[in-house]
Image: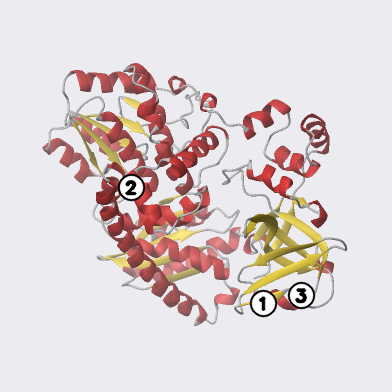
Amino acid sequence: MEKRWNLISADSTKVQSLQTGLKIHPILCELLVQRGISSFEEAKLFFRPSLDHLHDPWLMKDMQKAVDRIKVATQQNQKILVFGDYDVDGTTSVATLYQFLLNLTDKVDYYIPHRYKEGYGISKIGIDFAKENGFDLIISVDCGIKSKELISYAKEMGMDFIICDHHLPDDILPPAVAILNAKQIDCYYPYKELCGCGVVFKLITALAQTYDLPADTYLQYLDLVATAIAADIVPITDENRTLAFFGVQKVNENPSPGLKALMELANQSGTMRITNLVFAVAPRINAAGRMDDAKKAVQLFIEKDYDKALAFGEILQQDNLDRREADTYITEEALAQIENDPYHTNKKSSVVFKADWHKGVVGIVASRLIEKYYKPTIVLTQSGDVITGSARSVNGFNLYEALHACRTHLLGYGGHFAAAGMTMDVNALEGFKIAFENAVSERITESQLTPEITINAELPLDDISLQFYQIISQMEPFGPDNMRPLFIAKGVIDTGYSKLVKDLHISFNVTQGRNAVRGIGYNMPEHIKIVKSGKPFDIVFQLQLNEWQGSQTVQMQVMDIKPSENLK
């Protein structure tokens, strides 16, 4: 699929000023300015994260109320239930808060709603469970901010709620005794992008200070916080970057038995990075809720014995294998549906349905279809007597707005700009397909239907060095708003040693006239003709370290290729 290349720039005055202060390569200064760093002090904070940089938890609205209510619960021997979502952020949040509260009371338990029996967030079944088992206080983590009616229901039955959430609040808030959510309009906490587990971390920090507990009672959960940050795709900026930096450090030096077990099962033997947590660890955690019951993910995280943790990890591993199998065959069937649709080429959206597809993987399948066709996509299946499904968007297109335009065809829908879910009556399917295609067609632009690669800077091949790479490595952990830099080199020539490996990957050896640089381009066999043409071409790439027989060299991981004359 042809991709648009977007070479972004940085304020040249700020770049020059930063270069004067830092005395490093101007392209590195360009990368820093793109990340909002324009002074020596800001660069120092960025390159040298410290736990001292974390914001005071007491700045968060209702923190004192939350701590005071938990103190009452511990003093009066009241029972506390930690209630969380079934994804990575939810299960790590539950495990973190549950374990910490055991320092204060033994009257604590946890609850994860079943994805298919109860749905997302606070559930009536969960509140009834709390009442039947004598709980006085429910602390919701990674959910609750939208649950006005259910939290009112809990209050009527004499149970208090503390909400720890990071999702956008509505105008009318639930009647909780305390709401910890930096996105509240009257919350002046200086950083708004914490994930659910990050909010929990602020709460346990405040509790540790209140009860005069040592710092390790909350810092020991940084590996779980980093896993949640990675999986929830929140910006890796400010406080998130500090938490992720030290969390990844703990993952590598002293992970909890549960994380250690998952890393072993995922064959992660080298240095762990955020990307390893995203692509190797997080899917195994999510698989528990997708295929069955996410409670076992919490059991994994709270287990202190490594052998027992490994046994829980093996259950999650099997769930993930089942998830991958379902994902693979459903993707194949969905692709076949699209390929057999003679009108799909002219459509602006993709909507596929089959009654027996597994509900737990339809969102993943939607993402897979976008990789192939790059259109707003909905994958639907049948659940009981209704059709249910997941939608995924392309970059820059407001999916929720398009679904809202189709609301007369739906029983319910929810989500945000890039992803959503919906239910509809079985008889509404054909009408919905037409309405959704119309809604997308009216709103989407041609440029949004073409995937874009954002390039940070032009980097001459002769400027690639080990020192340059090492400074870029200090920008880790990478993630949203702090992505691994992408470079472009223009007018490169094949040295004659580039080749196709296993009929799939291009092994590069290119030059711009002086030094040759090696690299690899995965899954791009169709581009070998451009490379072997003898004509200059342009490449977009990341830098990576190649270690061989004790020596280290910097090479390119090539992401895309175009003939030089095609660059706009």
Q: Secondary structure at mark 2?
A: helix
**Tag shown at residue 373:** none
Residue to which mark 1 is pinned: 500
In percent of width and height, residue 405 lies at 49, 56
What residue appears at the point 67 percent right and 58 percent down from the top-left corner?
453
Q: Nearer the viewer, mark 1 or mark 3?
A: 1
**Tag shown at residue 258:** 2
The answer for how far apart the CA atoms under marks 3 and 2 are is: 47 Å
Q: What crowding class fits label 2: few (fewer than 14 Cα within 10 Å), some (14-19), or many (20 or more)?
A: many
What residue appears at the point 57 percent right and 46 percent down from the top-left corner?
480
In percent of width and height, residue 114 lies at 25, 52
Q: Secondary structure at mark 3?
A: helix
Q: Nearer the viewer, mark 3 or mark 2?
A: 2
1 or 3: tag closer to the N-terminus: 1
Q: Quadrant of the N terminus?
A: bottom right
Give 515 or 543, whichever is nearer the viewer.
515
